[in-house]
Structures are given as structure tokens and as C-alpha cells.
Image: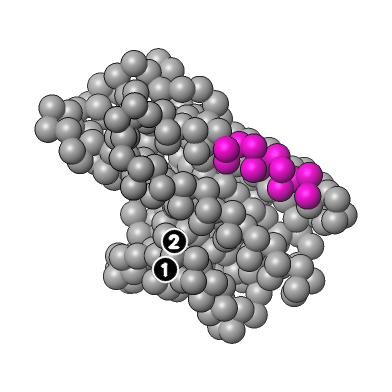
Amino acid sequence: MERWNGRVALVTGASVGIGAGLCRALVAHGMVVVGCARKVEKIRAIAEEDVVKAGPGKLVAIKCDLNQESEIHALFDEIRKTFGRLDVCINNAGLSHDAPLLSGSTSDWRNMLDVNIMALCICTQEAVKLMREKGIDDGQIIHISSMGGHRLPSAGMLGANFYCGTKFMVRALTEGLRRELKALNSRIRIASISPGMVETEFFDHYLKNDPTRNAKDIFKSMQALQAKDIADSVLYIMGTPPHVEVHDILMRPLEQAT
């Protein structure tokens, strides 16, 4: 990780869960981390934690609603103006609604497409553009995807079918970006991480309209992955030699059945 010391990383969805864990890990390895989210005050609170303030890197919070393309472009304008470069882009933001194919609302579907697909693609396009503009040819793009991009949900979570569809698309987009970068003879690397059950606020959001189920009960049934587990995988990808491209890491709790 030494070669990343002092360089700039963007983490989307940085206010809670996996994103917050990524910010802490990258700061601990000496990076300047731009964390973005709608609830920017939560990122500022992370930046004030003793372990984060101790560095050796630093965390900078920028407000950005990834549903709004104009705000994404403004985010990258600010990164360009303030830091003059971007070396790592981690597309962590993502969400799921309980929205079955036969009864889900189109507004929920569009929200998942906007955040899980459109924001990811726009951030990636802007990140690669900035890297190439600044002559950074050893940059790293990482998509935080899901095991849902490799198989469909169990019978008890049929409302996640559309979400899984977005993650199957992320899987295709990861390979598509790899091919486009190779066509440019670029050495910018692309990787994806596909976690299974992670103990974060994600399932609280998914189950928010279902009074019969509770995320805490799900996590009582198994030892789920933690945000640190995903952060460790990010550090592994970034720590590999520049000639190594890790394409996808699939990981899930030992006790997870599917």
C-alpha cells in the first residue's frame, strides 16, 4: 500500500456501513479520502474520530446526492479544483427496495437504477477522465457490488429480484470497462467486490416497510460479514503489484446458505 500514500481516493456512500469502514481504512494507510453522501454531517463526524484524526491520511466530506447527475459533476469539479487529481474511485453507494417484479413500484426501480447503475457509471466516467487528464495511469476503480450479481435471491427475498438485476449489470459493466481501458492501452485497473450478508444499515432500508421482519433477527441467525472485511478486500486489491488486475472477489459469511 506504500505507493498510495498521500494520494487521493473517492468513496461514495461514505456516511455509514461499508463506506464508513473504507474511509477509516484508507485514511489509516495515508490516503486523502473524499467521502461523499447526502448526509454529509455523518462523514464529518467520522473525520472527527480520534483514530481518523490521527491519520496519517485525512478524510474530507463533500455533500452529493447521487440521484442528481448535476451534483455528481459538481463533486468531481470540486475534487479537481481542491485536490487536482484522483487516484482511486470506489463506487460503494448502493441500495435495495423490497420491490418485486410483479408488484414493485416503478419509482423504487428507478431509484435503484439511478444509484446502483447510473451514478456508478457517471462516477466511473468522470474518475477515468480526471485520471487521464492528470496523467495518472496506475489508478484504481473498485465497484462494491454484491453476491446478488452472481445468483438470484432465496425464496424469502423475492422482492430483491430487481436489485439483483442491477448487480448483474454491474458485473457486466465491470468487464466492459476493463475492455474499454485495454482498448486505450491504459493501465488503470478495474475490480469488483461481491459481498454476501454484511451487518450494516442496508437491510434496515430493505425491510423498512415490512413489520414482520427485522434486520437484527437476520444477523442473530449467523455471523455476518463486517464492513472491515470488505475494507480488507479493498486493501488487498490496491496492494497487489501494478501488473495484477483482481477482477472480482466473491465473499460471504460461512453460515450463509446461498
Q: Residue furthest left?
A: 211
Q: Estimate the x, y position of residue 149 in percent, counting from the top left.
A: 53, 31
**Residue situated in front as seen by the camera: 119 or 32:** 119
Left or right of 244, for residue 98: left
Q: Is residue 25 left or right of residue 255?
A: right
Depth check, front residue: 182 or 218: 182
Residue 199: image quadrant is: top left
Seen from the viewer's position, the closer of residues 46 and 198 is: 198
| Residue sitting at x 46%, y 32% | 164
**Does the stretch in magenta take in 4?**
no
Asked if residue 130 lies left or right of residue 11, the reply is right
Numbered mark located on residue 66 in the image = 2
* Mark 1, secondary structure of its residue: loop
Label 1: how many Cα within 10 Å (few below 14, some 14–19, many 20+): many
Q: Is 174 part of what is drawn in magenta?
A: yes
Which quarter of the rendering shows the C terminus? Answer: top left
Labelled pair 1, 2 in contact (Cβ < 8 Å): yes
Please provide percent x and percent y for residue 28.
Answer: 49, 61
Q: Amino acid at mark 2?
A: Leu
Q: Main secondary structure of the magenta part?
A: helix
Q: Residue at x 59, y 54 (%)?
A: 121
Q: Mark 1 — residue?
A: 64
List x then y, in percent, for residue 220. Answer: 22, 26
Q: Quadrant of residue 155?
A: top left
Residue 199 seen anywhere in this rendered image of the structure: no
Q: Secondary structure at mark 2?
A: loop
Crowding at dot 2, Cα within 10 Å, few <14 / some 14-19 / many 20+, comes out as many
Region rendered in magenta: 169-180
Residue 148 position within the rendered picture, expressed as x and y whole percent measured from the top left:
47, 30
The N terminus - image quarter = bottom right
